[in-house]
Image (cartoon, rainbow, N blue to C red):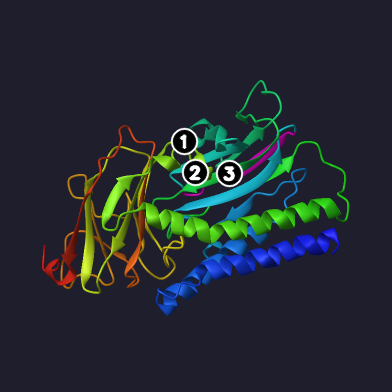
Amino acid sequence: MTPEARAWADLVDALSAAGRLLDDPGLPEDERADGYRALLRGLHHQLARFEVDRERPELVPFNGWRQKFFMDNPDTRYWVADVRGDRRYRITGHSGDAVYTSITAYTGSAGGTVAAARIDGDRLTTDPSGEFSVLVGGTEPGTGPWLPLPEGNGQLWVRHFHDDVADDRPGWCTIEPLTPPEPPPPIEAARFQHQVRRLAKTIQMMPVAFSAVEEQVEPNTVHHWAEMADGAAYTEPGIHYQRGAWRLGPDEALVIEGETVPCRHWNALLYSRYLNSLDYRHRTVSRTGATAALRDGRYRLILAARPPEGPFDGDWLDTEGRPSGLVVLRWLHTEEAPPLPRVRVHPIDELGGGT
């Protein structure tokens, strides 16, 4: 077998192995189908970034609804580019109606992913149209915003955090090398084999990650999620994460009540057991500090298959009728750690009729 055929066989074998791991006869049919859909979305996500070129990087939109991958967040718009640490680039963009913008450089280490450098909207200068420009890599210029790059290869992530993503004006961003490179070769066989094998390893790892996260969360509770802090797993540094789960009957709701803390942005978002956000295009599955009905600085989230009948106190989040799933609260740049909320299971019909 040729090296190319062996790499291709590794990819096919990885898909087959991942499919076998998802074949759980103890789950309802729809849940099993959802697992395979999550696997295909993850494959789509990885294929969209398969032919990365660090000499000619592109800021690629990340985690769209067809490409959900490992706890996507629809209240934040993302772009990702693979870059070289010994090159210089320029990022140009516009934040639209985002309440906060950040550009973060990540690099790998023995302990995982490290957020090596970052710059945010508070340090980005804009022209009269609202566009910003930042130099990336090389030596620090005498004037203007600049983001250093770590040695070796890494990734750049641009994030726009939105309080009302459905109505907010979207932003954009692009990246260009300051020194135009020579045209690339048509294809490099060894590099292609490496990329295919890397894709195979990612696919094979996905079902393992699905089950690992679900097993870490006790149903009908919410806890602090320290493992996601400080840029680990390509997260935004400065976010305090709280993670919970629900396990409910068809007429039950999980009520999550807590106090907000001063911060730049916060949201609460529902996920499937396969780490995909629920159907935010057609259902209310997230709330932010701007879309939640706060009372005296307190939020009250009602996770259920349907809203309570009649007036009710709080914000309903649609579980899509799923008997179980995950909920994540993100708090960006808090002045203090947000307290854990009170969590309880309650009959849906007893929550309505309020004022």
Of the numbered discs in the image, which one, if any, rests on residue 254? none
Q: Is residue 167 left or right of residue 234?
A: left
- Residue at (52% x, 30% y) in the render: 123
Query: Local crowd at mark 1 within 10 Å, few (<14), some, or many (≥20)?
Result: some
Identify the residue at horizontal 76%, vertical 60% (top origin): 7
Neighbour class for label 2 at 10 Å: few (<14), some, many (≥20)?
some
Mark before the other along the chain sequence, 2 or 1: 1
Secondary structure beneath label 1: loop
Residue 94 is a magenta residue:
yes
Numbered range of the magenta stretch:
87-97
Q: Amino acid at mark 3?
A: Trp
Mark drawn on residue 235: 2
Q: Which of labels 1 and 3 is toward the front?
A: 1
Q: Mark number for residue 230?
A: 1
Spatial CA span between label 2 and label 1: 7 Å
Q: Are marks 2 and 1 in contact (CB under 8 Å)?
A: yes
Q: On the image, numbered disc 3 is attached to which residue?
A: 157
Q: Is residue 55 left or right of residue 150?
A: right
Using residue 295 as the reference point, say whether residue 13 is left or right of it: right
